[in-house]
Amino acid sequence: MTKDEAFRAWCTRNGTAQEALAYDIWCAAEGNKMNTTLNQIRDESPCADGWKKLLTHLGKTQADDEPLSIITILDSNGLDDALWCLRVVTGHDREIRLYAVWCARQVQHLMTDKRSIDALDVAERYANGLATDKELAAASDAADAAWAAASAAAWAATSDARAAAWAAASDARAAAWAAWAASFAASDARAAASFAASFAADDADAQEKRLREVCAEIVEAN
């Protein structure tokens, strides 16, 4: 029995009905957040420094099963670790996929291949239940091909020894990769978000702000 379950049992046996109801309401509120737990994070073998930093922020010395919000991880460890921890968030696939698309769209102006932009459109529709797994997979393959073309252009630019051409081609390649990431496998919206944010990392502050907004929207919607 977890600590939460034990406390709920105590409320039922010894507390008032109001206390038990208040605890149930708190649990429901926690369930409506973008949450994970320390045990789930530990099972994914986090980096030692990030793990220690998070435990210190929480005032804990070991993992447990208490709900831990992505907002708290943002406050403690910052954006990169919060994105990494999305892999162990339960639920909220739609919101996480749409966040991936949002990140990639921040560099859409650098995308030189229509296939990249089309992939974002399909990924967005998929998140909203308007596209199939097959359509998403096809869009992802097309975005991958667009990235390959952008990579070839980047290599070609180096042969001319033109720094500006190389920079532009490299930006297009990164943007194409962000589009591919946003349309990543149907079963893994979390990886899509992490990859898309990494390859569209022009403005980490904006990405963090948007992730906080997504978390708040989830709570408000429930």
Image (tube, helix red, strand yellow):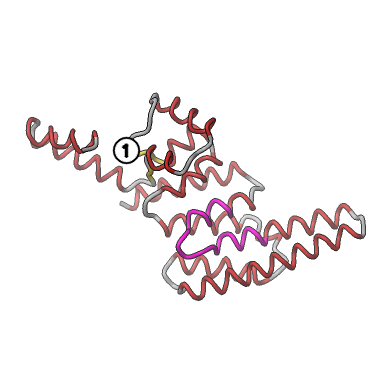
Q: What count of labels does the image hold?
A: 1
Residue 127 against residue 8 in the figure, above or below: below
Of 85 and 122, which appears nearest the observer?
85
Q: Does the magenta segment cover residue 193? A: yes
Residue 97 against residue 136 in the figure, above or below: above
Q: Residue 194: where, in percent of width, then height?
A: 54, 51
Q: Residue 60: where, in percent of width, then height?
A: 38, 26
Predominant secondary structure in magenta?
helix
Residue at 85% x, 58% y is 165
Q: Would residue 102 be found to the left or right of residue 218 on screen?
A: right
Q: Give the range drawn in magenta.
A: 176-196
Residue at 32% x, 38% y is 65
Check disc 1 and report the residue beneath it.
65
Q: Residue 103: where, in percent of width, then height?
A: 58, 54
Q: Would residue 118 be found to the left or right of residue 152 on screen?
A: left
Pick the quarter of the image with the N terminus: top left
Q: Would residue 13 be found to the left or right of residue 67 on screen?
A: left
Of 74 and 37, which appears nearest the observer?
37
Q: Mark 1: which amino acid?
A: Asp
Residue at 9% x, 31% y is 15
Q: Would residue 55 be found to the left or right of residue 22 on screen?
A: right
Residue at 51% x, 47% y is 210
The quarter of the displayed image where residue 138 is located: bottom right
Q: Residue 63: where, in percent of width, then height?
A: 37, 33
Residue 206 against residue 109 in the figure, above or below: above
Of 13 and 201, which appears nearest the observer?
13
